[in-house]
Image: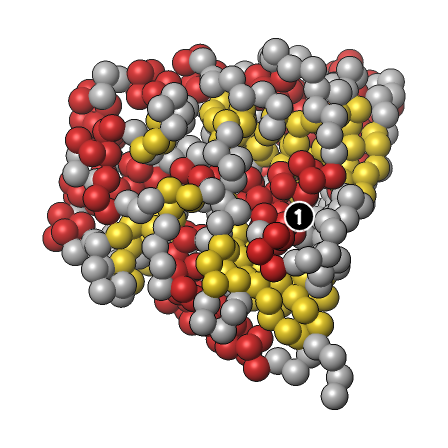
């Protein structure tokens, strides 16, 4: 009989793609299953993830793995996007919706809340979270309590998204550090506990004991189940396992998130207004972080450029860096100072008139120039008072040659690397519970690097 391959299964749930990834004991990716689910609408008619279909898919994949003749399932863990809660009643039945963090927050309700907490500045500093509406998981709970009291009163426990997926397999209810540290507005970073406002609003009793993200529980079948991690925080774990010199990570996707694991200082009020905040490592240590909606900005403006010049939306994907085109833009385009009003502030490219460019390529170059100028403001907030000499860029932008070269040209005092690793977020979730399932030593070659050196414009 053929020997089965011992594996850990990671359910990596993004906004678009829902993935199951299997890693062997050396953390080689041995299988990947990816699926997408059509969104549904919540009780207000706003789009949201179909948590029922997703839950069914996860259970189906899990049961198939248990029956596999190829893989010996040793452990399971989860990584998901943040700022999302799943609610269950006292019997453990899921109720309500996985509300979308992009759902507009009622301004009058926000003002009511902030008035009772001493204003936005005070509240942000106490929780190290910019005020971001439904992007603050705690504000979702407050919104349910005030706007949907009948539903709210049926909630036994509110679980962060990864912890709900873990609950599906274990029936155990936990809260976890990285989700509370990701702009939840629920954590008191000074006292290292749930913030007192949750108790004042009668929300605390619906929340669970907080555990570090490397916690795992055993099921009757001796399979180890992790309690799940926030995706951006999980993505830092392979770097921390591989490198010892101080570094920052620029994680790029819909959001570009700058993380400095070597800077635990809490952001100032001015920085909080501009999208700076504190994350928590899975062990509960603060990580100074800055968020920018740059990936979304890029995609929206690429569509505007493609429509104006009547080209395919993918026109930019094969472009090489051209220093002479940068010089031409510097000579012909009006210089507009970048600024950040909040994490969702778009780049100054929004104010540029497309008819002023010769073609789509020139317009695209200017878009990236403007995004990098804004990114520099965001990332420099987390570099203060630290001795970082390395920047690791992962995600979609690390494959964009124009973006990477301009980034290297901007941060000349730092070595800038595009990174390549097999599914970094899922890999981080696997490594987090390494001691619980894997007796093999952890490899130091988890991340492949390509350095981008500065060059003249």
Tell me residue 278's x, y (percent). 48, 26
Q: Nearer the viewer, residue 45 or 56?
A: 56
What residue is drawn where x is 24% and y is 34%?
A: 198
- Coloring basis for residues: secondary structure
Quadrant placement of the N terminus:
bottom right
Quadrant placement of the C terminus:
top right
User: On the image, which quarter does residue 24 sit in?
Assistant: bottom right
Q: Is residue 163 visible?
A: yes
Tell me residue 31's x, y (percent). 69, 67
The residue carrying mark 1 is: 424
Q: Nearer the viewer, residue 334 or 10?
A: 10
Q: Is 75 rendered above or below residue 122? A: below
Horizontal relation, residue 143 to residue 241: left or right: left
Tell me residue 405's x, y (percent). 80, 28
Q: Is 373 rendered above or below residue 283? A: above
What residue is drawn where x is 36% and y is 59%?
A: 172
Q: Is 451 rendered above or below residue 209? A: above
Q: Nearer the viewer, residue 282 or 13?
A: 282
What residue is drawn where x is 48% and y is 34%?
A: 284
Tell me residue 2's x, y (percent). 75, 84
Secondary element under disc 1, as helix, strand or loop, is helix
Q: Is 70 rendered above or below residue 22? A: below
């Amino acid at each position: 009989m053929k020997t089965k391959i011992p594996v850990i299964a990671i359910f990596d749930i993004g906004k678009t793609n829902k993935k199951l990834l299997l890693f062997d004991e050396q953390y080689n990716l041995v299988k990947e299953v990816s699926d997408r689910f059509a969104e549904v609408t919540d009780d207000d008619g706003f789009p949201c993830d179909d948590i029922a279909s997703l839950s069914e898919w996860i259970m189906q994949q899990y049961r198939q793995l248990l029956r596999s003749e190829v893989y010996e399932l040793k452990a399971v863990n989860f990584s998901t996007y943040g700022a999302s809660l799943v609610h269950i009643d006292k019997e453990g039945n899921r109720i309500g919706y996985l509300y979308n963090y992009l759902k507009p927050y009622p301004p009058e309700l926000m003002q009511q809340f902030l008035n009772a907490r001493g204003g936005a500045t005070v509240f942000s500093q106490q929780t190290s979270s910019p005020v971001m509406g439904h992007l603050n998981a705690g504000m979702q709970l407050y919104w349910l309590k005030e706007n949907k009291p009948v539903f709210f009163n049926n909630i036994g426990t509110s679980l962060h998204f990864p912890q709900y997926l873990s609950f599906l397999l274990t029936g155990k209810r936990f809260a976890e550090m990285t989700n509370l540290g990701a702009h939840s507005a629920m954590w008191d970073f000074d006292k290292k506990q749930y913030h007192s406002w949750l108790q004042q609003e009668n929300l605390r009793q619906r929340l669970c004991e907080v555990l570090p993200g490397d916690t795992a529980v055993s099921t009757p079948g001796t399979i180890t189940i992790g309690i799940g991690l926030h995706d951006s925080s999980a993505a830092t774990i392979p770097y921390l396992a591989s490198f010892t010199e101080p570094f920052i990570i620029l994680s790029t996707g819909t959001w570009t998130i700058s993380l400095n694991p070597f800077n635990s200082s809490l952001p100032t009020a001015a920085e909080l207004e501009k999208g700076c905040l504190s994350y928590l490592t899975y062990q509960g240590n603060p990580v100074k972080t800055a968020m920018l909606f740059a990936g979304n900005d890029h995609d929206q403006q690429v569509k505007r450029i493609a429509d104006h010049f009547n080209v395919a939306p993918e026109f930019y994907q094969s472009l090489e860096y051209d220093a002479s085109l940068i010089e031409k833009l510097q000579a012909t385009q009006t210089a507009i100072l970048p600024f950040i009003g909040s994490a969702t502030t778009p780049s100054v490219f929004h104010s540029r008139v497309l008819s002023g460019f010769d073609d789509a390529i020139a317009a695209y170059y200017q878009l990236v120039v403007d995004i990098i100028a804004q990114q520099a403001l965001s990332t420099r907030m987390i570099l203060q008072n630290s001795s970082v000499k390395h920047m690791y860029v992962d995600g979609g932008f690390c494959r964009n040659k124009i973006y990477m070269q301009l980034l290297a040209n901007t941060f000349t005092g730092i070595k800038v690397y595009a990174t390549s690793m097999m599914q970094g977020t899922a890999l981080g979730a696997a490594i987090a519970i390494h001691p619980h399932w894997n007796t093999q030593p952890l490899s130091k070659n988890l991340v492949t690097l390509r350095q981008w050196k500065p060059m003249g414009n």
